[in-house]
Amino acid sequence: MSSFQIIVGSMLGGSEYVAEACEETLTALGHQVEIHLQPEFEQILIENQNWLICTSTHGAGDYPDNIQAFVSDLEKSDQDLSSIKFLTIGIGDSSYDTFCYAAKKINTLLNSKGCTELLPLTTLDMSQEIDPEECAQLWLNENKDHL
Ligand SMILES: Cc1cc2nc3c(=O)[nH]c(=O)nc-3n(C[C@H](O)[C@H](O)[C@H](O)COP(=O)(O)O)c2cc1C
């Protein structure tokens, strides 16, 4: 069993639903889960944790407003983050050139900080007729042995 901190980046609420679906699945898999809709870096920073980043992209490839301070603190941090393991779900729309750019940027940032990527980033394209919550749950269940 692992402890997960779900870090949500959302402007319109869609990524929140995806995050809550992930919380449900991770809990059912026996993990401890805490969800952060207004993530604060210092509060979330606990050693030996798994982070699930669940973020949409807005503007022209920008982070949602509610996650910008978290990302800025992460960028500036000189703390040892090597005990953090993470996975990233990007929610976006492939009609934008900057498809899921926020998720891709934070995934790269976490790798550059020495964190361990548990699974390659996955993206959910909201321009397709998909059920994003179900897709995210399926992804976690299919990869449960890596969590
Ligand atoms: C003003 C605006 C800008 C957007 N820019 C991007 C973008 O650059 N890349 C992308 O993949 N999706 C983009 N999207 C699509 C959103 O990421 C998508 O609608 C997502 O489901 C919103 O999630 P949220 O409800 O959690 O904010 C944009 C949507 C809006 C309304």
Image: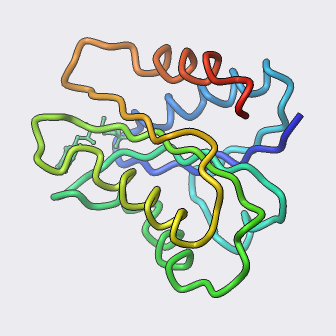
Q: Image quadrant of ligand 1?
A: top left
**Quadrant location of the N terminus?**
top right
- Along the viewing direction, whichever of 59 and 125 lies nearer the viewer: 125
Residue at 53% in and 69% down: 70
Instruction: Work out whether 37 lies above or below 95.
Output: below
Which residue is at a point 61% across and 24% down the rendered structure image?
A: 140
Residue 11 horizontal side relative to residue 25, left or right: left
Could you say where residue 10 lies in the image, as x and y percent from the top left?
A: 41, 47
**Image point 46% across, 41% down: which residue?**
121
Q: What percent of the width, then of the height, locates residue 125?
A: 27, 28
> Residue 32: which quarter of the image?
top right
Residue at 50 percent of width and 29 percent of height: 17
Query: How many numbered marks does the figure carry?
Result: 0
Q: Quadrant of the C terminus?
A: top right
Foreground residue, 109 or 12?
Answer: 109
What colouring does the structure picture have?
rainbow
Please provide percent x and percent y for residue 93: 21, 35
Percent from the top left, x then y, of residue 63?
A: 34, 60
Q: Is residue 36 left or right of residue 91?
A: right
Position of 71 with respect to 91 (left or right) is right
